[in-house]
Image: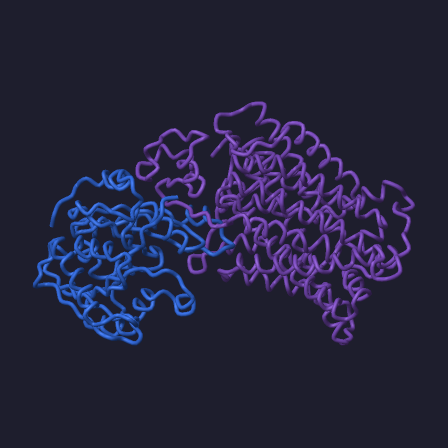
Chain colours: A blue, B purple
Amino acid sequence: MTETPTDDGERAANDDHGAPGDRPDAAAPTDRPSVLVPLEVLKGASLPNGTPELLANAHVVLLGYHVIPEQTAAEQAREQFGETGMAKLDEFADAFAAAGADVETRLVFTHDEATTIDRLIYEHDCLAVLVPNGVAQVESVLFPLRGTVGVERNSRLVAGLFADTDVDVTLYHALGADESPEDGASFAADVAAALAERGIAEDRIDTVVEDATVPVDAIADRAASYDVVVMGETDPSVTTFVFGMPSAQVAERFLGPVLVVQRARPEE
Amino acid sequence: MDDSDPTATPDPPSAPDPDPGPPGGDAETLAAAVDADTGAGELERTIGLVGGLAIGVGTMVGAGIFVFPGLAAANAGPAASLSFAIGAVIALLVALPASELATAMPRSGGGYFFISRGLGTAAGAVVGLGLWLGLVFASAFYLVGLGSYAGQVFLEAGIALPVDPAVPLGVAFGVGLTVLSLFGTENTAALQNGIVVLLLVILTVFLSYGSLDALGVFGVQSTPERFFPPGGALPVLQTAALVFTSYLGFAQVATVAGDIREPSRNLPLAMVGSVLIVGVLYVVTIFVATSAFGSARLGEFGETAMVEVARSFVGLPGALAIVFAGLLATFSSANASILSASRAVYAVSRDGILPAAASRLNLAYGTPHVALGLAGGPIVVLAATGRVALLAEVASFLHLVMYGLICVALIRLRRERPAWYDPSFRCPAGVAVAGVGGLASFALIAFMQPASIGVGAAVMLAAYGWYRHYATDIELAGDF
């Protein structure tokens, strides 16, 4: 476990690289990836099993939120539940810190959780959001690739979290309609090489390239034999409107933790 | 708990700038979007400009268009449109100072908050308790209106009822809405926005058609009635006092100020904008209605006069459309007022003017069940009286007192310039506008029926008595 005690440098460091996030500095592989962990703190009784261990190498932004109905003033809820929420959040933060992560906590009372999660991703420049589900032990990660866009960020997250561990990483690539198996294999090999360069031992990386009619189904089916899934956020399109984000579909069927890598956010 | 200023907190990321300087760029937008964390969590502001406008318009439009035209025309003839215009001007004169205060104190509680902080606890207690009861009267009024439209549904369906169903139905809706708001429906805001948009569409079509018809485009020009009623200006002003209930909603925008995104921009726009929108609709509505029928005839139709106006234009489909719109509008007004009344209870109870139990939230549903009960109970009782004009005037009375004091608070804060007073929107010609607005608000009260003035004054006295009995040791002036 690398000890990275400087948690105050994190924001400044990210803000200083002039270019807005989309060209993140490759020269900082030891930088802890920041991961947002949203927990409905007053409803859920406890932290899902194994989450602190999963994120031991991350910079955890622990978001405790409480959704209040429209007819209640947010202030009113904070006044009544704020202290309880804070106490619970601190308890969770201690668990993360004990596992080795650095932790920041935020407690938010909101009428709309999506707005809140979105804002915090932006404010803390989070690389990924955890869909918090329990996991007994983290030994294998499924890393589905979805085209070249954003793959750099996904790799940065996987390497940041698992480089110093003995977790096995499986790269999974479903071939596109007009993609030959050779192209697919070479794409996956490039990503594997990038992961190796970031410190994941080559013998721990496995690649699977296959034809899949519905990639989301294939990923969800395959996920069952892994402990964690790391996948990218997709641009909203008509299909995602109808069926929800692929990452959400996978999370729903997989029942284990899913790390959803966020697109680089344009600077305002 | 007070949220004095962000410098006291160690951890929020806005820490590098300890001075909350007014013209800050990023720091200000960040502060505007999110309240600083005071160690007990931060608040997400989720209502945008459209949501704010929908609260204002949704609360107001039910009364002015779907309940009052008949009553107003009976009293003031075609000049009732002037009465509505007078109301709009007074509302605007108050909305501008209220916007300034709201951007200086973007907290839930609205007028009560400004007055208790600007003028002290005694005025605050009277206004706070008065606002709660004022909204109770307003909700009861809307419920009777809603009951009238629900009764009209039976009429249109050809079902004869032995008694006038307006009051019993209004009471039933009152119970239903209170229960509904107790058990947390999370999509009320989205629903409200949808209802308001739909209403505006129906009204725009209806009023455009009606105006063209009144101007003689579709045939015979209607015989112009004498504009002023026999009594001259007096009935017009009395009617203005009666129908002022149609303009109470803009203050409801301020009661959710704590939840509004970018309050310095969205609060003034939503408050002033919603008054302008409904003001224009009301004036046109009276013009159309009095062109379709004589004022006396309109008066006979009572609360659902607009249904007959629509029927005279396009027959049954028009009548049905207006019945439907009237149901939506009075429903949304009643619902918004019940919620606002419960927020008013919360605001005074947070400050200790009512026992803290009044603002308890139910953890399972996240709703303030005691406050909702304190709103819903009296609303149902008042709705059962069925006295539309009295309910409306008492609601207006209690709000006008608050509006007048809002103007006084603005003038006093502008004079004294306390350090915490730093509005991001400044009302143009603030002191003059507030002066005229305050005088006009108090003056309008004088034109109400004696009974309404009596009930209103009794409520205020009772509120003051409660303050003397329960809350004399609370100091709220300038307390954040």
Image position, residue B271 (x, y; %): 60, 43
Any part of residue A136 in sight = no
Horizontally, is B264 left or right of B286 in the view? left
Relative to A186, residue B52 above or below: above
Image position, residue B142 (x, y; %): 68, 56
- Report the residue at 79% width, 40% height from top: B447
- Quadrant showing the N terminus of chain B: top left
The part of the image, by quadrant, that contains residue B65 is bottom right
Image position, residue A122 (x, y; %): 34, 48
Horizontally, is B54 left or right of A7 in the view? right
Image position, residue A252 (x, y; %): 32, 69
Comparing B374 with A228, the one in front is A228
- Report the residue at 59% width, 41% height from top: B128
Horizontally, is B26 left or right of B432 in the view? left
- Report the residue at 35% width, 37% height from top: B14
Any part of residue B93 in sight = yes
